[in-house]
Image (spheres, rainbow, N blue to C red):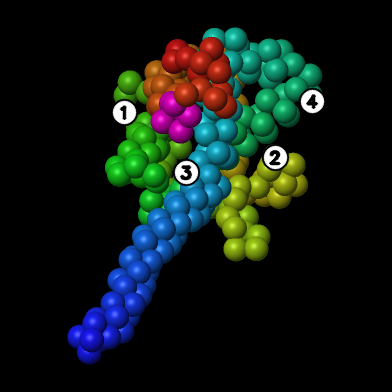
Amino acid sequence: MADGGLLNSVAPTALGALCGWLGGGVGGFFSSKHEKQKALQQREKEVSVYREPLAHAAFDLQSRIYNILERRFLNRMYVNGTERTREYSVENTSFLMAQLFCWFELTRQELYYIELKRAGDTEKLMHLQDHVQTLWGADRAEYQNACCIFAGEQRAIGENLIIRRDGISACMGYAQFMDTFPPGKNKQMDIVRAEVRELAADDGHAARARLVKIQHYLIDILTFLDPDSRRFPRDSTKKM
């Protein structure tokens, strides 16, 4: 009788401890899983701050390069255009170049601390950006020194367009660019304008070898950032 009483008193205690241990383990498992999901969502949110505008900057510039080389954009708008179209063709093309340099600089600064989703993705994106920057700054004979913007100039141009609000870094828009950097105000921006005018002078022929390769790498960046072509249609992202 004594043994039965002892067993009866111990059993509920042991059972409660077991249930508590199991409950804690299961609860901990789901809590850990929830925290990991939250961390992934937060990382995705942080990365998207840079990925989306970088993709748009790459898309806009590769499209402009295509229009310059294949549709004679600068010949129509600058050489044979009005005062308004001449200003727009130089200023907007300069902005599209500077905008890309700005997002390159921001991703260079920030993505060292914000890893992309898959292992190796951050490194791949950095390599693609490096290819574009190296091509733009290369002074090899095959490029005829046309549309050459050195690496340090690219970084300075990009840094000039960075704006910071509420702890978030971004690139200024076209309107702010026009107000902040009118011709003659900033040496780096005037370098870009001068290169655009040189492109217009010979319809982009001298710079074609460089710009075609740059356009190819910009398409590679778009393919990397938008592999399913959800944001940018495939017909608009073809290599020249």
Reading the image, the residue beneath label 1 is: 140
Which quadrant of the rendered structure holds the C terminus? top left
Viewer-nearest of discs 4 and 2: 2
Q: Secondary structure at mark 3?
A: helix
Reading the image, the residue beneath label 3 is: 104
Observer able to see residue 99: yes
- Sequence-wise, the earlier of marks 3 and 4 is 4
Q: Residue 48 at x, y = what percent?
A: 53, 44
Viewer-nearest of discs 1 and 3: 3
Q: Are marks 3 and 2 in contact (CB under 8 Å)?
A: no
What is the number of the mark on residue 84? Answer: 4
- Sequence-wise, the earlier of marks 1 and 4 is 4
Q: Are marks 1 and 3 in contact (CB under 8 Å)?
A: no
Residue 239 colored in magenta in the image: no
* Nearest to the observer: residue 172 or residue 112: 112
What is the number of the mark on residue 35? Answer: none
Residue at point 37% right, 61% down? 26
Q: Quadrant of residue 213?
A: top left
- Sequence-wise, the earlier of marks 1 and 2 is 1
Q: Residue 97 at x, y = what percent?
A: 55, 35
What is the number of the mark on residue 174? Answer: 2
Q: Residues within 10 Å of mark 1 (few under 14, many from 20)?
A: few
Name the residue type under label 3.
Answer: Phe
* Nearest to the observer: residue 104 or residue 150: 104
Q: Residue 35 at x, y = what percent?
A: 44, 60
